[in-house]
Amino acid sequence: MDNRPIGVFDSGLGGLTAVKKLKEVLPGEDIVYFGDTGRVPYGGRSRETIIRYTQQDIAFLLSMDIKAIIVACGTATTNALDYVKDSCPVPIYGVADPAAKRAAEITKNKKVGLIGTEASIRSGAYERLICRYDSDIEMTGVGCPLIVPMVEEGRISRDDKILYHTVEEYLTPLKEKGVDTLIMGCTHYPIISDVIGDIMGEGVALIDPGAEAAKLMKEELAALELLNDQERQALSVYYVSDVVYEFTKTASIFLGENVDDITIRIDIEHY
């Protein structure tokens, strides 16, 4: 058993989708979350910059004595995880592989859609992973550069017409392709899954990468005998690299709990 916390990081708010699921499947685990809100989004950056940011994010979490890490950022997972995982001293898991596996398991017509940041789409990582699980699957990817900034600004309501029409424009090619499964390849996207579901329709299954990664984390910690065995209320703390209020305002809505007193600003450039 290991009572150290689990570390989770993302470019901003998106990784809270993984945190929310972790709290459900592993209620006894402490969580340290870092949202790199000062440098969000990662999706338009070069691979070299994404790798550097990822290394700094990991270094910060390691300074908090964590026992495992979820890279709850689709862009960091698809562009940097293969580069950093061998040097990481604790188990580290991305969001792409479990999401791709789940999509391959549930698609019926073998037409899978993917929405993600431009860097994630450009990497081709999801296509390679899907092919590993089922080479007959046809995948169509669409880059959605405007969604992350909108979510970070708190535009997450299904009544937001600008958000709806923006998402609708991105999703139209996938609807025309007839996909029956859609990977929300950036962890920001499940925050607006109601909007995405409204547009895609009931017949399309939505894959939440953060949720799939949290389930994988539970399996891995159990297999490695690293679960927390303390009988007490689990603790969570949130760190950001920019204004605390802008993060806590939306985070509290999404998580259903006030995180004002447990959110701390840090200088990520020190790591």
Image (tube, rainbow, N blue to C red):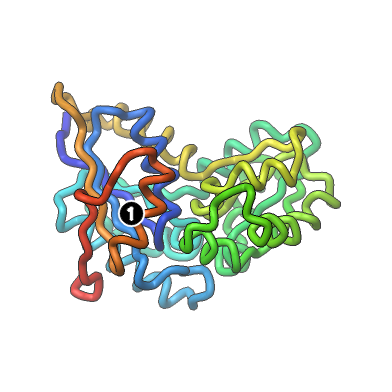
Q: Where is residue 129 in the image (x, y as percent from the top left)?
A: 59, 49
Query: With 246 as the anchor, is 101 left or right in this view?
Result: right
Give the residue at x 60% y 67%.
Answer: 146
Give the residue at x 32% y 29%.
Answer: 26
Q: Where is residue 188 in the image (x, y as percent from the top left)?
A: 50, 54
Dot 1 surroundings within 10 Å: few (below 14), some, or many (20 or more)?
many
Give the residue at x 51% y 44%.
Answer: 209
Give the residue at x 42% y 71%.
Answer: 50
Asked whether the viewer can see residue 130, the reply is no
Is 235 located above or below residue 239 in the figure? above
Asked whether the viewer can see residue 248, the reply is yes
* Viewer-nearest residue: 89 or 184: 184
Tag 1 secondary structure:
helix
Dot 1 amino acid type: Thr
State the residue position of label 1: 248
Count all numbered tags in the image, as a single digit: 1
* Viewer-nearest residue: 45 or 15: 15
* Viewer-nearest residue: 88 or 16: 16
Query: With 266 as the anchor, is 188 left or right in this view?
Result: right
Query: With 194 as the anchor, is 226 left or right in this view?
Result: left
Is 25 located above or below residue 41 in the figure? above
